[in-house]
Structure formats: structure tokens, C-alpha cells
Image (cartoon, rainbow, N blue to C red):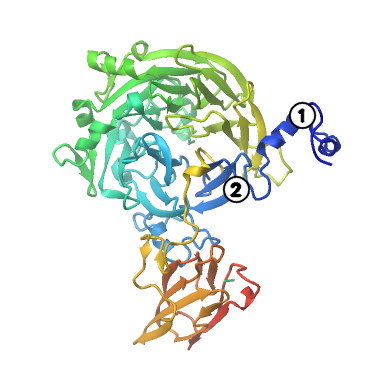
Amino acid sequence: MTGGDDEGGLSSSAQEVADARGLTDLDIQAALKTFVPSGGRDEYVMFASGGHSGSVFAIGIPSMRILKSIAVFTPESWQGYGIGGPTEAVLDQGNYNGQDITWGDTHHPALSETAGDYDGEFLFINDKAAGRVAVIDLKDFETKQIVKNPFSNIDHGGTFVTPDTEWVIEGPQYAAPLGGEYASLDDYNEVYRGYIMFWKFDREAGRIDESKSFGMELPPYWQDLCDVGKLESAGWLFCGSLNSERATGGIEDGNPPFESGVSQNDMDYLHIVNWEKATEMGRNASMTESYNGMPYISIDTAVAEDLLFMAPEPKSPHGSDVTPDGKYVIVSGKLDPHITGYSFENMMSAIDSGAGSPDPYGIRVLPFDDVVVAQIEVGLGPLHTQFGGDGIAYTSLFLDNAVAKWSFGDTWELLETIPTQYNVGHIAAAEGDTVSPDGNYLVSLNKWATDRFQNVGPLLPQNLQLLDISMEHPQVIYDMAMGVGEPHYAQIIKADKLDPWQVYPEIGWDPHTQAVDPDAAMPGQERVERNGNNVEIWMTAIRSHFTPENVEIREGDNVTWHITNIERAYDATHGFALPGHNVTLSLEPGEAATFEFVAGNSGVFNFYCTEFCSALHLEMMGHLLVQP
Ligand code: RUQ
Ligand code: CUA
């Protein structure tokens, strides 16, 4: 039986289900708001960092279904990422000093923007653990490039993009000597520094252009999260910091441990950077220093050129978030129950009036009272702020296990506190970092879920909670166990702004050049060619066979193997697994790949397709015969 009763309620059969499962009216509402019927589509896609899983996850909202994991800084066998195939070269871009780096700690994804609005073309993400930034092309949701910060072995405060994605900004964190070279901690104040990177993004090429990028030297204050100005504050960026004490730790020598040494002062420093002006001189040799061929603007030059100012910010701050209209910067003090609102207009007048006095590095610190327009007590452990449109903001409260809802602009006041079920790190709102947030969904990215799920052993799942913020009193409407590494930040884009390919545009496509590979194996031209010890193989894959199926070579041969999936059908991915050689590939329709190896061992190796691509998938195999 279907249909509603007179009050527009549930049919008796649905009510029976609810009764049998003990669901309350709010449970039923939450279920109805998040249920996407079989075959339906989500309204939004959230790109969540995977923390020390080194990956990124695409998650549908409101259903909270994981749609895809995107391998970024770490090999991933299902996608054939970084294991024997051409994507090894993508991962290798992130190696340094001769060291392979095969994991990452992804923190802050940034969608590409046009006029301050997500445009759905690219995603950027940082790796805190090694100071790297990756570029993901949303045409195929694959990682295309990794760049290594030449000045620093660690980062944190990025990635963030300028309103038209001309620049991808990688903010620093823990200070170290230039290039991570050795210097004693006794020389901390003189030699240790933070370096913010300005990576030039070439949208046409879909790559960061290292030859047009540059850095800026900052004091050793542990710069934390940054955000880029927009509209009124376009051209500027803002980074919090947490160690104005310049503590160097050493609990083992009787020094205060970092946790207290870094929290002595009442104020730390909000860094205020004119990035637009900096980009005019960042590649000018007469204005910059350079390290390993990468230029950077020194603190002295930044001060002399009015690129860098600071303002006091209370007690070990964490987030710094620019309001959608660009008028205010919101800072949260982890050890202060307030959020502090800074007016961009007031910052500019304080700069123009010459107010303030220099810090030990000569950077002018603007007077707190001149630039702060409001402080609101929101709760304990405020971290990150997101926006819901119409002067409404939300701040995560790590210690209170809650999200504060408050207003800004005309009236600055706490409106209410919404409980979440464990410590909240970041929160992410639908279209939340754009000039026009949607104000309907907010995801609370919680740390360990202690009481929400089946016990799965001592390593607890992280929990992403979906909140309906269109309600007068917002509520949690879904609990989503991540099942993988800790998401730090996420961005949520309208699904209809994404326009990925269904299949690669042409047969023989190389996803890493986004063009046809001239060496790709093509249908009808499959062959094996030998030239001395060098063997080159051109192989195609189509349901349900490889051509050729058997390949005979000799021990010690240098092998170059081209393989192309020549399907044009939407659902015809083939995998290629080569036992004994650490090779796994995922070949989407049209995709071509090349890999190389030296045939080190004689034997017979049964290669096969790893995707259950047809009823005759098991037959999609062949023999690599290596003669002794
Ligand atoms: S910040 S710890 Cu995104 Cu809260 Cu990295
Ligand atoms: Cu192709 Cu299984």
C-alpha cells in the first residue's frame, strides 16, 4: 500500500517499518533527507582529504556514499597507481634528495575557482609530511602532477587558490633552515624560517609551472592555516601562526615541552600578505634570493615593499577564514573560547596610517584594536569557520564536540551550539569557500568515533557527520564512518559543475599528457619487435582478450611494453596484472600505458585482466615466457 494519510505523513507500511525499527520522527526526517533512491544522483560531491592515507575521497552528499578514492601521494593497486606503470613517474616527481617518498599526509583540498566560485576543473591538495602539492584533473579524477616545495620538507597551511586559480598557495608550518639543511636549534631565531610557496597554475596545460613559481620567507612562527581574500580583499591572503614564542622544545633537557612552550604568549600573529604585489616581483632576480634555482622574496624585501604585515591574534590560533564577501577574516584561538573578526578595511587603513610597531624581524604589527571589529565567545576549542550565506557562520568546537552557529556583519552574536558526537576538526559547507555558499549542508569532520559504530578494534573509524543547516535548528542527519585515514579538510561542490569524461576522448590516450600517445599500441598493429637485447611489445586489450596473448622473450632482455585498451564502451575498463614484476595497471576505455622492465628471471608468468569485464573475463589472460 502506498500514499499518505490526511496529514501528509507516511503510509502505514512505512510507519510500520519505522515503528518496528524504533525510529523517531527526527530519524525518519533524517532518513528521507539523505536517502538517494537506487539509480539516483547526489546533489553535491565532497572532496575530502584522506590524511595519512595519502589519498583523496570523493563522497556524494547527501547520501554520504564514497564514490571514488583518488590515489595521490601513495601507490594504490586498484587504480594501478604508482605500481609498475607510467603513474610511477607521477609519484617520482615527489621524491627528493634521492629518497623515494611513497606516502603522504593530505590536509587541505582546494577546488579550482573562476571569479571566486568553484569551476569543477581541477583539485589541488597538499602533503604535510613532505611539503608537496598535487594537481588532480577532474576530467578523469586522476593525479597528474606532484611538486615538491624546494625550501621546506613540511607544509600545512595550503592548498588555497586565488579567485581565478592563477596561483596555488602552499602555506608553511614548522620552521626549519632553508632547504631543510642542518643548523643547530641554538640558531633558531636567526636561521629557522617558514616559506610560503606561490605555485603558478597553467590552466591550459593543467599543470603547475615551476618555472614561474616562487616563495616568500616568513619568520619562524609556525604559520598555520591560510585563506585567500576575495571580492573586497582580493589580492591579499591571511595566515595564522601559533609559535610567536619561537619555542624550540627539549623536554629531555628540562625545557618546557612544545605543548606549553608554544602557548606562553597571549597573542600570536596573523600574517597579512599582499600576494598580488608579491607576484609582480616573485620572479624578478633583483628583488629575490634563490635556492636551488627557485626564487624567494626575503623578509627584508617583503617589509620594504609593503608585502607583509601582521596583526596580533589570541592564544594559539588555528583557522583563518575569509567571509564570502571578503570583508572579514575570522580567526579562532584554540586556547581561547572566542572567534575574532578582523575587518579588511580597517587593516588597510591601519597599514596606510603607519600604525603599529615592528616585530623582531622588522615586520609591522598592526594594533589589535585598530583591526578587530568583534569577538564572540563561541565555546571551547574553536578551530575552523565555514559560511552558510546571509551573514551566518559556523565554527567547529574541538573541545566541546560541537559546531557553533553565529552571525556576523551587522550583529555579531552566537546563535546556537549544535552537538556533534566527537572532537571536530574541520567543517565543510556546501560551496563553503566560494563567494556564495549554499547554506544547506555542512559536514563535521570528526576525529575518532568512540560510540557511533560497531567495534572494529582499537584503531577507531573517523566519523563524518552531515548536518542539515537549512533547518532553523541544524541537526546531524547522517553518520558516516570513513573506514580510511583521517580526513582533515574537504570542499563540497555542486555535482552539476563537474563534467568528467565517460571514456578517454580517443584510442591511445595518455592520461598524463592528456593527448594521444604516439607510441600507443593501436588495433591491427599489435606486434613484438626485437633489436638485440631490446624487446618492444605493442599489445591491445578488448573484451575478452589481449593481442598478442603469448609473448616469448629471453632472460636479461630490456622490455618496453605498450598496452592500449581499445574499447569505446562506457563500461569496459580492463586491468593488467603481471605477476612477478610488480606491475598492475588500470586501463580505462581508450587509455594507453607504457611500462619497462628488465627480464630478471626466467619462467612463465600468467598475465591477466583484473577487472571482471565480461562473462569470459577469466579467459582474458596470456603468457609471458622468459627463456633462460
Ligand atoms: S588543520 S592539523 Cu586543517 Cu585543522 Cu591540519
Ligand atoms: Cu578485461 Cu577482465
**Residue 542 image point, x, y percent:** 53, 74
Q: Which residue is mark 1?
A: 8
Q: Is residue 471 above or below residue 565?
A: above
Q: Which residue is mark 2?
A: 66
Q: Secondary structure at mark 1?
A: loop
The amino acid beneath tag 1 is Gly
Neighbour class for label 2 at 10 Å: few (<14), some, many (≥20)?
Answer: some
The answer to whether any part of residue 354 appears in the image is no
Is 599 placed left or right of 613 in the picture? Answer: left
Q: Secondary structure at mark 2?
A: strand
The answer to whether any part of residue 218 appears in the image is yes
As measured in the structure, the alpha-carbon distance from the residue carrying label 1 to the one carrying label 2 is 33 Å
**Residue 163 image point, x, y percent:** 35, 35
Rendered residue at 47%/17% (across/down): 408
Q: Quadrant of the N terminus?
A: top right
Q: Is residue 312 above or below residue 320?
A: above
Which one is in front, 318 or 542? 542
Is 523 placed left or right of 513 in the picture? Answer: right
The amino acid beneath tag 2 is Ile
User: Residue 533 sits in which quadrant?
Assistant: bottom left
Contact? badges 1 and 2 (CB < 8 Å): no
User: Residue 321 sits in which quadrant?
Assistant: top left
Disc on res. 27: none
Rendered residue at 39%/60% (across/down): 512
Which sits earlier in the primary sequence, circle 1 or circle 2? 1
**Residue 312 image point, x, y percent:** 37, 18
**Residue 81 image point, x, y percent:** 48, 60
- Ligand 1 within 8 A of label 1's CB? no
